[in-house]
Image (spheres, rainbow, N blue to C red):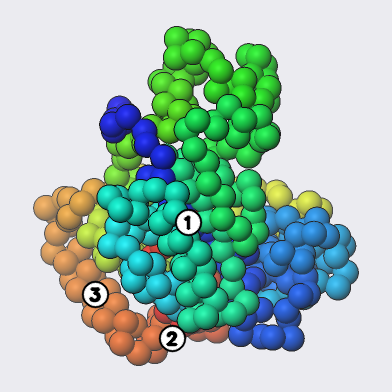
Amino acid sequence: MIEYGQKPEDFTILFLDMDAFFASVEQQVQPNLREKPVGVAPYIGNTGCVIAKSQQAKIYGVKTGCSVEQAKAICPQIKIVQSRPALYYFYHQQIIKILESHSPFLKILSIDEFKITLTGPDQNFKTALQMAKAIKQDITEKVGDYLTCSVGIGPNLFLAKVAAESKKPNTIAIVKLKDLASFYQGLKLTDLTGINSKMAANLKNIGIATPFAFYSKTLPQLSRFLGHLGKVWFLQLRGYEIEQAYSATKTLGHSHVLAPQFRQYYQARKVLVKLCQKVAARLRAGGFAAGGVCLTARFLENKPYHSGWQKVMKTAAFSDSQTLLSHALKLFQQIAKNKKILYLSVTTFNLTQGRGVQISLFANFEKSKAVSEALDKITDRFGAQAVFPASMSGAQSSAPDRIPFGQPRYDIKNQ
């Protein structure tokens, strides 16, 4: 189901995207990294994954998602630094303060993306542009002189975001309804938010090779080609603000690329304990009970070392750490002990809000849940390594908090 608002108007949405945010924060606090290619990775060994890169690294062709080894091959002088989620959240909060000082109509989209709805006297070219310039100046002067952002202003979030990203970095881009045809003529399909290379190929197969061709199609044509999504694209390409009904949280999980010292079976088992502790804590924090567990592993064998393995178990409802660990260990025991484990992921599914626990299990569930909640309180006050299961000994610092995609979590702790 989709809903769309009134007829689109210019200067309705101001979208702000921090440029190379994680890497820029590292360059902000480490001046020796400025103007140099920098990659940020949760694990800085060769098998680690680059989750962010500086503008300088981008020039060399380093891509987000490549391995540290690949990044070094592309750019031998790149400096790889370990990610620091708590630091990035600190700067995220400072940016929020700046934005809230300029408008009460702020929506946080992610750790580095924000939306301001412009209304009344702000909804014109002059004042919208002045606000964008003032925000950029305040971020530079009050948050960090090495932090830049790209701002897009348009009739809806989609167009404001595309405008900002088409002119990155450190710019202000404005798109108006009367200029949409020429705006789309200057873009590639993959410049449109929501279109990756696979979807672009599919669109080309049905005769849509450019954004302008996409924009030129009628509603019946797009509906015939794309079904329900055809209407979504038809409207947002024309500046309508689309509100889609998003489903509730369906899964909760954590994953981790293991450091070399934890890739043997019994050492990896300790990391699994840590992952289960974190997942169960998030279940309880969200008021969820889970009805299933999925364990995924990847093994370090021959490059590109993506030998994969996955097992799934449906269970009675639970939210306590001990029950999750018990289920996960049953799955983990199916891994051959001679495997070198590169990656582990624990995901819970069939989530329900509240207890949802069978009566026969209720007493044991409540007892284990009470213990887990007591440990949560200790962790919240004294940190993640204050108390932990003996089976996790030696791996307490593994699987630290990471920055999630989408809406940021505010339970990040120094671990």
Give the amino acid type for the residue marked by disc 3 in the picture.
Answer: Glu
User: Residue 231 appears in which quarter of the rendering?
Assistant: top left
Q: Nearer the viewer, mark 1 or mark 2?
A: 1
Answer whether residue 337 is visible to the viewer in this image.
no
Q: Nearer the viewer, residue 37 or 86?
A: 37
Residue wearing tag 1: 129
Task: Classify mark 2: residues with Cα within 10 Å, few (<14), some (14-19) or many (20+).
Answer: few
- Say whether residue 77 is left or right of residue 194: right
Residue wearing tag 2: 385
Q: Which of marks 2 and 3 precedes in the sequence? A: 3
Q: Which of marks 2 and 1 precedes in the sequence? A: 1
Q: Residue at point 54% right, 15% down? A: 217
Q: Which of marks 3 and 1 precedes in the sequence? A: 1
Q: Quadrant of the N terminus?
A: top left
Q: Residue at point 22% right, 60% down? A: 287
> Picture coordinates of residue 237 (x, y %)?
49, 29
Answer whether residue 415 is visible to the viewer in this image.
yes
Distance between the alpha carbons at the discs numbered 1 and 2: 48 Å
Distance between the alpha carbons at the discs numbered 3 and 2: 16 Å
Give the amino acid type for the residue marked by disc 1 in the picture.
Answer: Leu
Q: Nearer the viewer, residue 410 or 6?
A: 6
Residue wearing tag 3: 373
Q: Residue at point 43% right, 33% down? A: 239
Q: Is residue 386 above or below residue 13?
A: below
Distance between the alpha carbons at the discs numbered 1 and 3: 49 Å
- Say whether residue 201 is left or right of residue 220: right
Give the secondary structure at mark 3.
helix
Give the secondary structure at mark 1.
helix
Q: Nearer the viewer, residue 325 or 107?
A: 107
> Picture coordinates of residue 31 (x, y %)?
69, 86
